[in-house]
Image: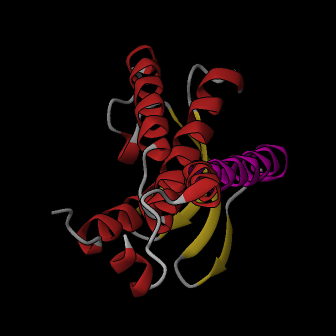
Amino acid sequence: MRGVQERGAVAALSRGPRAASARRADRWARPALSTAVAAGLVAVDQVTKTLAVDHLHHPVHLLGPLGLGLAFNSGVAFSLFQGAPAVVAPVATVVVVLLGLAAWRSRSGALSVGLGLVLGGALGNLADRAFRGRGGAVVDFITLRHWPTFNLADAGITIGAVVVALAVLVQPRAR
């Protein structure tokens, strides 16, 4: 016993109540980040789609290849599965649930942001399918020369997928 006393303070075997509190806060921080990113994207996406439907009556050229033109897509990315909303909506719902679970379990801030973007984009497009009353079609309004018309939800999905891929590739491997 005397040898332990002479060496000075010994590190605690447990991290104590402060460390447990920090772990609990950290456990909620990343899902909260994903949720905030997703909610922000859904809000901006729905506002811009509403503005497009209400005010975009003819195509508008903005700058270079960028323009605005109203379109409705009943398919998924690049108009795949066009005219099959009965299949697309249930699959999209399953994808949203899986993305939510992945966001809940994310281990890094970058991964949380990426998953939040993909989740927000998926929810924004799913909301169109469920509530806009256009036969399950999604509002698209951003045009680029030589590229299909898209919306902010689509952009969020694409950017989020890139962020997720980069976060997974650069994250340190667990041993």
Task: Please tell me whether residue 41 is drawn above or below residue 104 in the rendered image.
Answer: below
Q: Which residue lies furthest to the left in this view?
A: 175
* Residue 7 on image: x %, y %: 39, 86
* Residue 89 on image: x %, y %: 47, 22
Q: What stretch is highlighted in magenta?
A: 31-56
**Side of 138 relative to 101 (left or right):** right
Q: Residue at position x 47%, y 52% from top?
A: 115
Q: Which residue lies furthest to the top in this view?
A: 86
Q: Residue at position x 82%, y 50% from top?
A: 51
For the C terminus, the image quarter is bottom left
The secondary structure that most of the magenta stretch takes on is helix
Residue 36 painted magenta? yes
Residue 8 painted magenta? no
Q: Residue at position x 64%, y 24% from top?
A: 134
* Residue 43 on image: x %, y %: 76, 48
Residue 29, can we see it?
no
Q: Residue at position x 24%, y 70% from top?
A: 169
Q: Which residue lies furthest to the front in this view?
A: 2
29 or 118: nearer the viewer: 29
Task: Please tell me whether residue 68 is drawn above or below residue 93 in the rendered image.
Answer: below
* Residue 143 on image: x %, y %: 55, 63
For the N terminus, the image quarter is bottom left
Residue 58, can we see it?
yes
